[in-house]
Image (cartoon, rainbow, N blue to C red):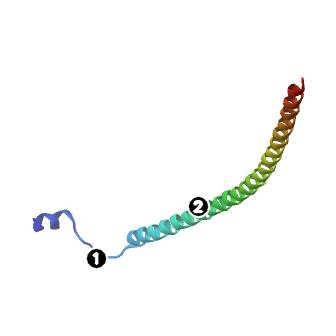
Amino acid sequence: MPTTARRIMKFDPTVNSGTIIQTLVFVISIAVAYGAYREDQTRQDGRITQVEVLADKDRDATKESLKELKGQVSDLQKSTQEIKESLAILRGRATESGGKR
């Protein structure tokens, strides 16, 4: 098997302009790919920052809305309690006037 491998592939230890150009193209390709990767990463970081800012604003708006809702529920509970008390008074008066007849 080693003899077949020697026939298929032959190692040439000489350095020529083609080898140098291939090496330069390879190095430049890696540099360009890394630059594109960093640019994409920077854009992604910017998008993440935007989303975080919007999420903070939405969270603050939600908290404010929740406070308003809690205030409205509290007002409704007070109103309901006042209605119950008024109804109890009216029932008491109705019972008194019904008993006097």
Q: Can you say whether 101 is above or below 55 in the image?
A: above
Residue, far front: 100
Report the front residue among 24 and 55: 55
Callout 1: few (<14), some (14-19), or many (20+) C-alpha neighbours within 10 Å?
few
Q: How many marks?
A: 2
Image quadrant holding the N terminus, namely bottom left
| Pair 1/2: label in front | 2
Q: Which residue is mark 1?
A: 13
Question: Label 1, label 2: how many angstroms apart (C-alpha)?
Answer: 40 Å
Q: Earlier in the sequence, mark 1 or mark 2?
A: 1
Q: Position of residue 51 (x, y in %)?
A: 67, 57
Residue occupying the point 60% across, 64% down: 39
Image quadrant holding the C terminus, namely top right
| Residue type beneath disc 1 | Pro
Q: Quadrant of residue 44?
A: bottom right
Circle 1/circle 2 CB separation < 8 Å: no
Residue 4 appears left or right of 24? left
Q: Secondary structure at mark 2?
A: helix
Q: Can you say whether 59 is above or below 93 in the image?
A: below
Residue 33 appears left or right of 7? right
Q: Secondary structure at mark 1?
A: loop
Report the front residue among 48 and 31: 48
Report the front residue among 26 and 96: 96
Q: Can you say whether 96 is above or below 67 in the image?
A: above
| Residue type beneath disc 2 | Asp
Residue occupying the point 42% across, 71% down: 23
Q: Position of residue 80 (x, y in %)?
A: 81, 41
Residue 14 appears left or right of 23? left
Q: Which residue is mark 2?
A: 40
Q: Position of residue 92 (x, y in %)?
A: 85, 34
